[in-house]
Image (cartoon, helix red, strand yellow):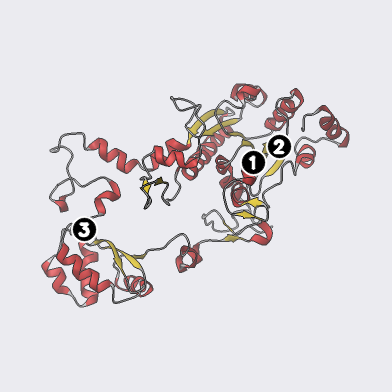
Amino acid sequence: MAGSAQSQSPLSGVRIVESSLLGPAAITTHLVDLGAEVIKVESPSGDYVREMTWPIVEGVSLMHLHLNRGKRSITLDLKSPAGVAIYKELVASADAVVEAMRPGALARLGLGFEDLEAVNPRIVFCSISGYGATGPYKDMPSHGIAYDVWAGLVNPAYDEDGYCYIPEHPSMGIHAGPLMGALGILAGIVRARATGQGCEMELAQSDAAAYMDWYRSESWVAYERPEDVVTGNKSDNYVRRAPGTAGMKEGVRYNMYDSADGQVLFMASEQAFWKNFCEALGRMDLFERWPGSKFADHARGNRELQKELREIFRTRTTAEWVAWSDEVNTPIAPVNTPKTIVDDPQFKARFDWLDHETHGADMLQLPIHFGGDVSLVDPALAPAVGEHTDAVLRDVLGYDDARVAAARESGALG
Protein backbone atom coordinates (compact mmCIF):
# COMPACT_ATOMS: atom_id res chain seq x y z
CA MET A 1 0.00 0.00 0.00
CA ALA A 2 1.40 3.42 -0.92
CA GLY A 3 2.40 5.66 1.92
CA SER A 4 0.46 8.58 3.32
CA ALA A 5 1.77 12.00 4.30
CA GLN A 6 2.23 10.77 7.88
CA SER A 7 4.10 7.56 7.02
CA GLN A 8 7.84 7.14 6.72
CA SER A 9 9.44 5.25 3.84
CA PRO A 10 12.39 3.02 4.77
CA LEU A 11 14.89 4.68 2.43
CA SER A 12 13.87 8.29 3.00
CA GLY A 13 17.04 10.39 2.84
CA VAL A 14 18.92 8.03 0.50
CA ARG A 15 20.00 9.64 -2.77
CA ILE A 16 21.23 7.70 -5.79
CA VAL A 17 22.63 9.01 -9.06
CA GLU A 18 21.89 6.61 -11.89
CA SER A 19 23.34 6.34 -15.37
CA SER A 20 21.35 3.65 -17.12
CA LEU A 21 20.12 2.28 -20.41
CA LEU A 22 17.26 -0.17 -20.86
CA GLY A 23 16.42 -2.99 -18.43
CA PRO A 24 19.25 -2.71 -15.88
CA ALA A 25 17.55 0.48 -14.65
CA ALA A 26 15.43 -1.92 -12.58
CA ILE A 27 18.24 -1.92 -10.02
CA THR A 28 16.88 1.30 -8.54
CA THR A 29 13.17 0.76 -9.22
CA HIS A 30 12.93 -1.27 -6.04
CA LEU A 31 14.79 1.43 -4.11
CA VAL A 32 12.44 4.13 -5.42
CA ASP A 33 9.45 2.17 -4.14
CA LEU A 34 11.20 2.01 -0.77
CA GLY A 35 11.61 5.78 -0.70
CA ALA A 36 15.04 6.49 -2.17
CA GLU A 37 15.54 9.57 -4.34
CA VAL A 38 16.92 8.50 -7.71
CA ILE A 39 18.28 11.02 -10.18
CA LYS A 40 18.49 9.45 -13.61
CA VAL A 41 21.21 11.19 -15.61
CA GLU A 42 20.54 10.85 -19.32
CA SER A 43 22.31 11.93 -22.46
CA PRO A 44 20.57 14.74 -24.35
CA SER A 45 19.00 12.13 -26.64
CA GLY A 46 17.73 10.14 -23.67
CA ASP A 47 17.40 6.48 -22.78
CA TYR A 48 15.72 4.75 -25.72
CA VAL A 49 13.97 2.35 -23.34
CA ARG A 50 10.93 4.56 -23.96
CA GLU A 51 10.61 2.98 -27.41
CA MET A 52 11.51 -0.62 -26.56
CA THR A 53 9.45 -3.81 -26.44
CA TRP A 54 5.68 -3.97 -26.06
CA PRO A 55 3.11 -2.85 -25.12
CA ILE A 56 3.42 0.83 -25.99
CA VAL A 57 1.09 2.86 -23.80
CA GLU A 58 0.09 6.22 -25.29
CA GLY A 59 3.42 6.39 -27.13
CA VAL A 60 5.64 5.25 -24.23
CA SER A 61 6.77 1.72 -23.47
CA LEU A 62 5.47 -0.13 -20.43
CA MET A 63 9.09 -1.01 -19.71
CA HIS A 64 9.99 2.65 -19.20
CA LEU A 65 6.85 3.39 -17.20
CA HIS A 66 7.64 0.51 -14.85
CA LEU A 67 11.44 0.68 -14.56
CA ASN A 68 11.81 4.44 -14.28
CA ARG A 69 8.76 5.31 -12.22
CA GLY A 70 9.44 7.75 -9.44
CA LYS A 71 12.83 8.82 -10.80
CA ARG A 72 13.85 12.35 -11.75
CA SER A 73 15.48 12.82 -15.15
CA ILE A 74 18.25 15.29 -15.84
CA THR A 75 20.11 15.56 -19.13
CA LEU A 76 23.85 16.10 -19.11
CA ASP A 77 26.34 16.00 -21.94
CA LEU A 78 29.05 13.96 -20.25
CA LYS A 79 31.36 14.48 -23.20
CA SER A 80 31.68 18.09 -22.11
CA PRO A 81 33.81 19.18 -19.11
CA ALA A 82 30.90 21.26 -17.83
CA GLY A 83 28.59 18.24 -17.89
CA VAL A 84 31.15 16.11 -16.03
CA ALA A 85 31.55 18.85 -13.43
CA ILE A 86 27.79 18.94 -12.74
CA TYR A 87 27.72 15.14 -12.48
CA LYS A 88 30.40 15.31 -9.80
CA GLU A 89 28.40 17.96 -7.97
CA LEU A 90 25.45 15.59 -7.85
CA VAL A 91 27.65 12.78 -6.56
CA ALA A 92 28.99 14.95 -3.75
CA SER A 93 25.68 14.68 -1.87
CA ALA A 94 24.71 11.18 -3.01
CA ASP A 95 24.91 7.83 -1.25
CA ALA A 96 25.41 5.74 -4.36
CA VAL A 97 26.10 5.85 -8.09
CA VAL A 98 24.70 3.23 -10.43
CA GLU A 99 26.29 2.45 -13.77
CA ALA A 100 23.62 0.34 -15.48
CA MET A 101 25.24 -0.14 -18.88
CA ARG A 102 28.42 -1.69 -20.23
CA PRO A 103 31.07 -1.73 -17.48
CA GLY A 104 33.59 1.09 -17.56
CA ALA A 105 31.31 3.50 -19.45
CA LEU A 106 31.55 6.14 -16.72
CA ALA A 107 35.28 5.61 -16.17
CA ARG A 108 35.90 6.40 -19.82
CA LEU A 109 34.23 9.75 -19.18
CA GLY A 110 36.33 10.50 -16.11
CA LEU A 111 33.55 9.43 -13.76
CA GLY A 112 34.76 6.04 -12.53
CA PHE A 113 34.84 4.99 -8.90
CA GLU A 114 38.23 6.54 -8.14
CA ASP A 115 37.19 9.81 -9.78
CA LEU A 116 33.98 9.96 -7.74
CA GLU A 117 35.58 8.73 -4.52
CA ALA A 118 37.78 11.81 -4.65
CA VAL A 119 34.60 13.91 -4.66
CA ASN A 120 32.73 11.84 -2.05
CA PRO A 121 34.74 9.30 -0.01
CA ARG A 122 31.48 7.66 1.16
CA ILE A 123 30.15 6.96 -2.30
CA VAL A 124 28.96 3.44 -3.14
CA PHE A 125 29.59 2.68 -6.80
CA CYS A 126 27.66 -0.19 -8.39
CA SER A 127 28.09 -1.30 -11.98
CA ILE A 128 25.49 -3.71 -13.39
CA SER A 129 25.84 -5.06 -16.91
CA GLY A 130 25.00 -8.05 -19.07
CA TYR A 131 28.09 -10.21 -18.62
CA GLY A 132 30.01 -8.27 -15.99
CA ALA A 133 33.37 -6.50 -15.99
CA THR A 134 35.55 -9.59 -16.44
CA GLY A 135 35.63 -12.68 -18.60
CA PRO A 136 35.69 -13.19 -22.38
CA TYR A 137 32.11 -11.94 -22.85
CA LYS A 138 32.49 -8.65 -20.94
CA ASP A 139 32.47 -6.38 -24.00
CA MET A 140 29.78 -8.20 -25.96
CA PRO A 141 26.49 -6.45 -26.74
CA SER A 142 23.48 -8.35 -25.44
CA HIS A 143 19.84 -8.26 -24.38
CA GLY A 144 17.96 -9.81 -21.48
CA ILE A 145 17.07 -13.23 -22.90
CA ALA A 146 20.78 -13.84 -23.54
CA TYR A 147 21.40 -14.17 -19.82
CA ASP A 148 18.72 -16.82 -19.40
CA VAL A 149 19.80 -18.95 -22.36
CA TRP A 150 23.45 -18.56 -21.32
CA ALA A 151 22.52 -19.80 -17.84
CA GLY A 152 20.76 -22.86 -19.27
CA LEU A 153 17.29 -21.77 -18.17
CA VAL A 154 15.52 -21.83 -21.55
CA ASN A 155 15.29 -24.86 -23.82
CA PRO A 156 15.14 -24.14 -27.58
CA ALA A 157 11.79 -24.88 -29.21
CA TYR A 158 10.91 -25.71 -32.81
CA ASP A 159 7.83 -24.79 -34.83
CA GLU A 160 5.94 -27.01 -37.25
CA ASP A 161 8.31 -26.01 -40.07
CA GLY A 162 11.39 -26.96 -38.07
CA TYR A 163 12.52 -23.41 -37.30
CA CYS A 164 14.08 -22.86 -33.91
CA TYR A 165 12.45 -20.15 -31.76
CA ILE A 166 12.43 -18.63 -28.28
CA PRO A 167 9.68 -20.30 -26.22
CA GLU A 168 7.60 -18.42 -23.69
CA HIS A 169 9.43 -18.36 -20.38
CA PRO A 170 9.74 -16.20 -17.26
CA SER A 171 12.73 -13.85 -17.45
CA MET A 172 15.30 -14.37 -14.72
CA GLY A 173 18.53 -12.43 -15.27
CA ILE A 174 16.95 -9.03 -15.93
CA HIS A 175 15.01 -9.30 -12.68
CA ALA A 176 17.34 -11.21 -10.36
CA GLY A 177 20.37 -9.12 -11.34
CA PRO A 178 18.83 -5.79 -10.33
CA LEU A 179 17.48 -7.28 -7.09
CA MET A 180 20.93 -8.56 -6.14
CA GLY A 181 22.41 -5.21 -7.12
CA ALA A 182 19.92 -3.34 -4.94
CA LEU A 183 20.87 -5.62 -2.04
CA GLY A 184 24.55 -4.89 -2.63
CA ILE A 185 23.94 -1.14 -2.82
CA LEU A 186 22.08 -1.14 0.50
CA ALA A 187 24.84 -3.20 2.12
CA GLY A 188 27.41 -0.71 0.82
CA ILE A 189 25.41 2.26 2.12
CA VAL A 190 25.05 0.69 5.57
CA ARG A 191 28.82 0.17 5.67
CA ALA A 192 29.57 3.66 4.36
CA ARG A 193 27.35 5.30 6.95
CA ALA A 194 29.04 3.31 9.70
CA THR A 195 32.65 3.75 8.55
CA GLY A 196 32.66 6.80 6.30
CA GLN A 197 34.20 4.66 3.57
CA GLY A 198 32.55 3.93 0.25
CA CYS A 199 33.08 0.90 -1.96
CA GLU A 200 32.94 -0.34 -5.52
CA MET A 201 31.02 -3.37 -6.75
CA GLU A 202 29.97 -4.89 -10.03
CA LEU A 203 27.61 -7.66 -11.03
CA ALA A 204 26.25 -9.30 -14.15
CA GLN A 205 22.69 -10.12 -15.00
CA SER A 206 23.94 -13.37 -16.54
CA ASP A 207 25.63 -14.31 -13.26
CA ALA A 208 22.40 -13.65 -11.40
CA ALA A 209 20.45 -15.92 -13.74
CA ALA A 210 22.92 -18.74 -13.17
CA TYR A 211 23.03 -18.15 -9.43
CA MET A 212 19.25 -18.31 -9.11
CA ASP A 213 19.41 -21.78 -10.68
CA TRP A 214 22.02 -22.95 -8.15
CA TYR A 215 20.07 -26.07 -7.20
CA ARG A 216 20.42 -27.66 -10.62
CA SER A 217 24.01 -26.63 -11.31
CA GLU A 218 25.19 -27.58 -7.82
CA SER A 219 23.37 -30.94 -8.12
CA TRP A 220 25.19 -31.73 -11.35
CA VAL A 221 28.50 -30.87 -9.70
CA ALA A 222 27.59 -33.00 -6.68
CA TYR A 223 26.78 -35.93 -9.00
CA GLU A 224 30.34 -35.84 -10.30
CA ARG A 225 31.39 -37.34 -6.97
CA PRO A 226 31.15 -41.12 -6.41
CA GLU A 227 27.64 -42.58 -6.19
CA ASP A 228 28.31 -44.06 -2.76
CA VAL A 229 29.08 -40.55 -1.49
CA VAL A 230 26.36 -38.51 -3.20
CA THR A 231 23.12 -40.47 -3.53
CA GLY A 232 19.46 -39.90 -4.16
CA ASN A 233 16.82 -39.46 -1.46
CA LYS A 234 15.94 -42.21 1.02
CA SER A 235 12.39 -42.40 -0.36
CA ASP A 236 13.84 -43.19 -3.81
CA ASN A 237 16.01 -45.98 -2.38
CA TYR A 238 18.92 -43.57 -2.73
CA VAL A 239 18.75 -43.72 -6.54
CA ARG A 240 19.73 -40.38 -8.05
CA ARG A 241 17.06 -38.30 -9.76
CA ALA A 242 17.71 -35.71 -12.44
CA PRO A 243 18.54 -32.35 -10.80
CA GLY A 244 15.87 -29.80 -9.97
CA THR A 245 12.43 -29.91 -11.50
CA ALA A 246 13.54 -32.45 -14.13
CA GLY A 247 13.39 -34.98 -11.32
CA MET A 248 9.69 -34.22 -10.79
CA LYS A 249 8.44 -35.73 -14.05
CA GLU A 250 7.84 -39.22 -12.67
CA GLY A 251 6.34 -37.98 -9.41
CA VAL A 252 2.81 -39.06 -8.47
CA ARG A 253 2.05 -37.65 -5.04
CA TYR A 254 3.84 -34.51 -6.17
CA ASN A 255 2.70 -33.51 -9.63
CA MET A 256 0.10 -31.65 -11.69
CA TYR A 257 -3.36 -33.03 -12.36
CA ASP A 258 -6.32 -31.91 -14.44
CA SER A 259 -9.22 -30.57 -12.39
CA ALA A 260 -12.78 -30.18 -13.67
CA ASP A 261 -11.92 -26.78 -15.15
CA GLY A 262 -8.13 -26.44 -15.20
CA GLN A 263 -5.19 -27.89 -13.36
CA VAL A 264 -3.94 -28.23 -9.79
CA LEU A 265 -0.55 -29.03 -8.28
CA PHE A 266 -0.71 -31.83 -5.70
CA MET A 267 2.18 -31.81 -3.20
CA ALA A 268 1.62 -34.54 -0.61
CA SER A 269 5.25 -35.62 -0.46
CA GLU A 270 5.12 -35.89 3.34
CA GLN A 271 3.37 -38.96 4.70
CA ALA A 272 1.24 -36.86 7.09
CA PHE A 273 -0.17 -34.76 4.24
CA TRP A 274 -0.84 -37.89 2.17
CA LYS A 275 -2.73 -39.44 5.08
CA ASN A 276 -4.82 -36.29 5.53
CA PHE A 277 -5.72 -36.38 1.84
CA CYS A 278 -6.81 -40.03 1.92
CA GLU A 279 -8.77 -39.67 5.18
CA ALA A 280 -10.68 -36.61 4.00
CA LEU A 281 -11.58 -38.34 0.73
CA GLY A 282 -12.67 -41.51 2.46
CA ARG A 283 -9.99 -43.39 0.54
CA MET A 284 -7.79 -44.82 3.28
CA ASP A 285 -7.36 -47.84 1.02
CA LEU A 286 -4.94 -45.71 -1.01
CA PHE A 287 -2.92 -44.88 2.09
CA GLU A 288 -2.92 -48.45 3.38
CA ARG A 289 -1.70 -49.77 0.04
CA TRP A 290 0.86 -47.03 -0.61
CA PRO A 291 1.71 -45.34 2.72
CA GLY A 292 5.05 -44.03 1.47
CA SER A 293 8.04 -42.80 3.46
CA LYS A 294 7.80 -40.12 6.13
CA PHE A 295 9.39 -37.37 4.02
CA ALA A 296 10.01 -36.50 0.36
CA ASP A 297 8.19 -39.50 -1.10
CA HIS A 298 6.60 -38.72 -4.46
CA ALA A 299 5.53 -42.32 -5.19
CA ARG A 300 7.76 -42.01 -8.18
CA GLY A 301 6.68 -44.00 -11.22
CA ASN A 302 3.58 -45.49 -9.56
CA ARG A 303 1.26 -45.42 -12.59
CA GLU A 304 -1.49 -47.31 -10.81
CA LEU A 305 -1.74 -44.67 -8.11
CA GLN A 306 -1.35 -41.90 -10.67
CA LYS A 307 -4.36 -43.24 -12.58
CA GLU A 308 -6.44 -43.22 -9.39
CA LEU A 309 -5.43 -39.64 -8.60
CA ARG A 310 -6.10 -38.49 -12.14
CA GLU A 311 -9.70 -39.63 -11.88
CA ILE A 312 -10.10 -38.17 -8.38
CA PHE A 313 -8.88 -34.69 -9.32
CA ARG A 314 -11.20 -34.48 -12.30
CA THR A 315 -14.22 -34.53 -9.96
CA ARG A 316 -13.85 -30.97 -8.63
CA THR A 317 -12.92 -27.54 -9.92
CA THR A 318 -9.59 -25.96 -9.13
CA ALA A 319 -11.19 -23.51 -6.69
CA GLU A 320 -12.99 -26.35 -4.93
CA TRP A 321 -9.78 -28.33 -4.51
CA VAL A 322 -7.89 -25.32 -3.17
CA ALA A 323 -10.58 -24.55 -0.59
CA TRP A 324 -10.81 -28.22 0.36
CA SER A 325 -7.03 -28.52 0.81
CA ASP A 326 -7.12 -25.67 3.31
CA GLU A 327 -9.84 -27.40 5.30
CA VAL A 328 -8.14 -30.81 5.50
CA ASN A 329 -4.49 -29.65 5.65
CA THR A 330 -3.04 -31.18 2.52
CA PRO A 331 -1.11 -29.08 -0.03
CA ILE A 332 -2.90 -28.36 -3.31
CA ALA A 333 -2.21 -25.23 -5.36
CA PRO A 334 -3.94 -23.65 -8.37
CA VAL A 335 -2.03 -23.65 -11.65
CA ASN A 336 -2.21 -20.11 -13.02
CA THR A 337 -0.92 -18.34 -16.11
CA PRO A 338 0.46 -14.79 -16.38
CA LYS A 339 -3.02 -13.79 -17.60
CA THR A 340 -5.10 -15.53 -14.94
CA ILE A 341 -2.88 -14.83 -11.92
CA VAL A 342 -4.30 -11.33 -11.50
CA ASP A 343 -7.75 -12.80 -10.79
CA ASP A 344 -6.48 -15.27 -8.19
CA PRO A 345 -7.87 -14.36 -4.73
CA GLN A 346 -4.46 -14.75 -3.08
CA PHE A 347 -2.92 -12.42 -5.65
CA LYS A 348 -5.68 -9.89 -5.12
CA ALA A 349 -5.16 -10.01 -1.35
CA ARG A 350 -1.40 -9.52 -1.55
CA PHE A 351 -0.65 -7.11 -4.39
CA ASP A 352 -1.26 -3.39 -4.70
CA TRP A 353 -1.58 -1.82 -8.14
CA LEU A 354 -0.28 1.54 -9.27
CA ASP A 355 -3.10 2.85 -11.45
CA HIS A 356 -2.72 3.92 -15.07
CA GLU A 357 -4.44 7.26 -14.47
CA THR A 358 -1.52 8.38 -12.31
CA HIS A 359 1.35 6.19 -13.44
CA GLY A 360 0.73 5.75 -17.17
CA ALA A 361 0.04 2.03 -16.89
CA ASP A 362 -1.32 -0.40 -14.33
CA MET A 363 1.77 -1.71 -12.56
CA LEU A 364 2.51 -3.90 -9.58
CA GLN A 365 4.06 -2.29 -6.57
CA LEU A 366 6.96 -3.88 -4.71
CA PRO A 367 5.43 -6.77 -2.68
CA ILE A 368 6.84 -5.84 0.73
CA HIS A 369 4.35 -5.22 3.51
CA PHE A 370 5.40 -3.01 6.41
CA GLY A 371 3.63 -2.55 9.71
CA GLY A 372 3.04 0.61 11.72
CA ASP A 373 3.76 3.93 10.07
CA VAL A 374 6.43 2.52 7.69
CA SER A 375 5.34 2.12 4.09
CA LEU A 376 6.31 2.15 0.45
CA VAL A 377 6.01 5.37 -1.50
CA ASP A 378 3.58 6.14 -4.31
CA PRO A 379 6.08 6.83 -7.12
CA ALA A 380 5.58 9.55 -9.67
CA LEU A 381 5.05 8.92 -13.37
CA ALA A 382 8.24 7.83 -15.17
CA PRO A 383 9.93 10.99 -16.48
CA ALA A 384 10.29 12.39 -19.95
CA VAL A 385 13.88 12.98 -21.04
CA GLY A 386 15.35 15.78 -18.93
CA GLU A 387 12.01 16.58 -17.37
CA HIS A 388 13.56 17.53 -14.02
CA THR A 389 16.83 19.09 -15.18
CA ASP A 390 16.14 22.58 -13.88
CA ALA A 391 14.46 21.34 -10.70
CA VAL A 392 17.38 19.05 -9.81
CA LEU A 393 19.91 21.82 -10.40
CA ARG A 394 17.93 24.10 -8.12
CA ASP A 395 16.79 21.65 -5.43
CA VAL A 396 19.86 19.44 -5.14
CA LEU A 397 22.70 21.75 -6.13
CA GLY A 398 21.21 25.09 -5.09
CA TYR A 399 21.58 26.73 -8.49
CA ASP A 400 19.82 30.01 -9.05
CA ASP A 401 18.35 31.07 -12.38
CA ALA A 402 21.62 32.59 -13.54
CA ARG A 403 23.61 29.40 -12.88
CA VAL A 404 20.98 27.25 -14.58
CA ALA A 405 21.14 29.54 -17.61
CA ALA A 406 24.93 29.43 -17.55
CA ALA A 407 24.95 25.63 -17.43
CA ARG A 408 22.64 25.52 -20.40
CA GLU A 409 24.74 28.07 -22.28
CA SER A 410 27.90 26.04 -21.62
CA GLY A 411 26.42 22.99 -23.33
CA ALA A 412 26.52 20.94 -20.14
CA LEU A 413 22.83 20.11 -20.44
CA GLY A 414 22.98 19.20 -24.12
Amino acid type indicated by mark 1: Tyr
Is residue 276 among the parts visible in the rendering?
no
> Residue at point 19% right, 70% down?
308
Q: Which of 110 and 163 is in front in this view?
A: 163
> Residue at point 24% right, 73% down?
312
Neighbours of disc 1 within 10 Å: few (<14), some (14-19), many (20+): few
Left or right, residue 345 beside residue 46 = left
Residue 341 in picture, x, y percent from top left: 46, 63
> Residue at point 21% right, 72% down?
278
Look at mark 2 in the image and give the residue it sits on: 45
Left or right, residue 161 beside residue 381 = left
* Discs 1, 2 touching: Cβ within 8 Å: yes
Neighbours of disc 2 within 10 Å: few (<14), some (14-19), many (20+): few
Spatial CA span between label 1 and label 2: 8 Å
Give me the disc on residue 298: 3
- Where does the N terminus fall, quadrant-wise? bottom right
What is the secondary structure assignment of the residue under circle 3? Answer: loop
Residue 174 in picture, x, y percent from top left: 49, 43
- Where does the C terminus fall, quadrant-wise? top right
> Is 41 drawn above or below residue 383 in the view shown?
above
Spatial CA span between label 3 and label 1: 49 Å
Look at mark 1 in the image and give the residue it sits on: 48
What is the secondary structure assignment of the residue under circle 1? Answer: helix
Residue 16 in picture, x, y percent from top left: 63, 38
Amino acid type indicated by mark 3: His
> Is 292 drawn above or below residue 172 in the view shown?
below
Left or right, residue 358 beside residue 271 = right
What is the secondary structure assignment of the residue under circle 2? Answer: loop
Q: Nearer the viewer, residue 78 or 111?
A: 78
Of the numbered discs 2 and 3, the one sitting upstream in the chain is 2
> Residue at point 83% right, 34% down?
404
